[in-house]
Image: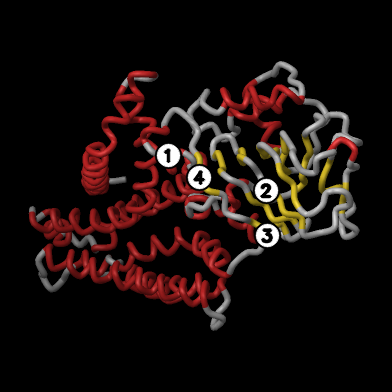
Amino acid sequence: MTQIDRYVLILFLRTVCVCFLSLAGIFIVFHAFTAMDDLIAQSKVGDSLPLVLAKFYGPYLLLLFDMTGTIITLMAFLFTAGWLRRTGELTATLSAGVSHGRILRPMVIASLAIISVQLANREWVIPRFRDSLTMKAKNLSGDIEQAVMPTYDQSSGILIEGDKLRTLGRVISRPNFRLYSDYAGFGDVLLAREAIWWDPAAMAEWRAEKGPTEPAGPDTASSQLASAGTATFGIDAKRSSWKDLAGRTGMPDVTGYLLQGVRRPEQLSSVPSAGLSSREDMVILTPADQPWLGPTECFVVTSIHPNMLQTQDTATKLASVMELAGRVRNPAVHSSMALRTTTHERIVRAPLDFALILLVLPMVVNRRGRKLFVLIGSAVGLIIAFFALKTVASTLGGSTTLVTPGIAAWIPLLIIGPLAYSRYRHVQTV
């Protein structure tokens, strides 16, 4: 890397940082005006105010970077090139026989690195803070509740409903599981006090991180759950509310919900476990033949994750590509055309963002001598056209039958990709 490369790179990265920090500062200042009382109240009962602010606004800054990183990078491209032109440094370098493509190469590489960081942040970091991003400032130290979106498990014929979903603890309050398949002795509904999500793979990881856990019996779950839900902040992906299940023996090696305080059927301990003729495994496990269950407990085998029960759209928007693909492949739940389109859009987002940045290169060259604000206006128009194309393609894939979701999501890249590459090749010789 030459000295001029380092100079251009530092100037570009400094512009990106200044733009992002300015935007983040505006967001924090305006939001803090409405939430400062709650944040101060949290600092009086726990951590210091700076730590509370970091816990609350840290995940939001990660989300802000994911939403605006590409646009900020594109604008930094224009500002950096405009500054080099204004100071005469760009003209002096061009007079030495160096092409625009060679001068802009450090910024192109840095832009690719920023988009790669965005990708890593979107796929591996933001999903861990998904619950934190749904919190209000007053809920920072505890669990939050939201309404349950009824979801039908097609493989077992059970409609999963409930009163409230505690997102941190993965607990459904007053679950109401409607049975649309024939389960002998269970009637048409399962009513209980609460239902706790059980995932053996995630529990194994949680145990490995937390170390050995004291044994716990079936009747200790409810008492421990109430305190565990507020024990730690929501960034722990394994959920402290699982502490009541970690020491229990006999838990199945499949995912599902442990229902506690079952009120219906009334004589649960005398009803044997039941399944379906279309499935080899049992779907509803009862204490009649499962000694690890308490007298008012039963276990419902299902792959309907609590994230699918959230009424807020953060469960989809903040999920990773692997999670979205898992939902599409899940035979127990219906996958809409919109969800399939969203999954493909997430796959092509990184190359599409990089193609958008390459589209702005001819504006950076600016052989017509247009002023910086004219270039910024042209870039804004380009961005609007870019998002309009994405919106149209997403609408075609999610709400029509004209094209498949996969084709709809790839249409913008198929149109913009070749155009961006041709513009990039043109800049190399100018």
Residue 27 is at least partly visible in this image:
yes
Name the side, left or right, on which 101 lies relative to 239. Answer: left
Q: Nearer the viewer, mark 2 or mark 3?
A: 2
Identify the mark nearer the N-term, 2 or 1.
1
- CA distance for labels 2 and 3: 18 Å
What is the quadrant of residue 289 in the picture?
A: top right
Quarter of the figure with residue 404: bottom right
Q: Work out whether residue 200 can be spotted.
A: no
Count of numbered badges drawn on the protein: 4
Amino acid on which the number 4 mark rests in the picture: Gln
Identify the residue at horizontal 82%, vertical 52% (top origin): 187
Q: Position of residue 275 (x, y in %)?
A: 87, 51
Residue at x 52% of width, y 60% of height: 347
Q: Which of labels 3 and 4 is toward the front? A: 4
Which SS class for mark 4?
Answer: strand
Earlier sequence position, callout 4 versus callout 1? 1
Q: Residues within 10 Å of mark 4 (few under 14, many from 20)?
A: some
| Residue tagged 4 | 146
Left or right, 234 with reference to 104 = right
Q: Nearer the viewer, mark 4 or mark 1?
A: 4
In percent of width and height, residue 31 lies at 26, 41
Residue where numbered disc 2 is placed = 176
Residue projecting furthest to the front = 266
Q: Is residue 233 above or below residue 165?
A: above
Question: Disc 3 to disc 4, how far (Cα)?
Answer: 21 Å
306 vs 326, nearest the viewer? 306
Residue designated by label 3 = 333
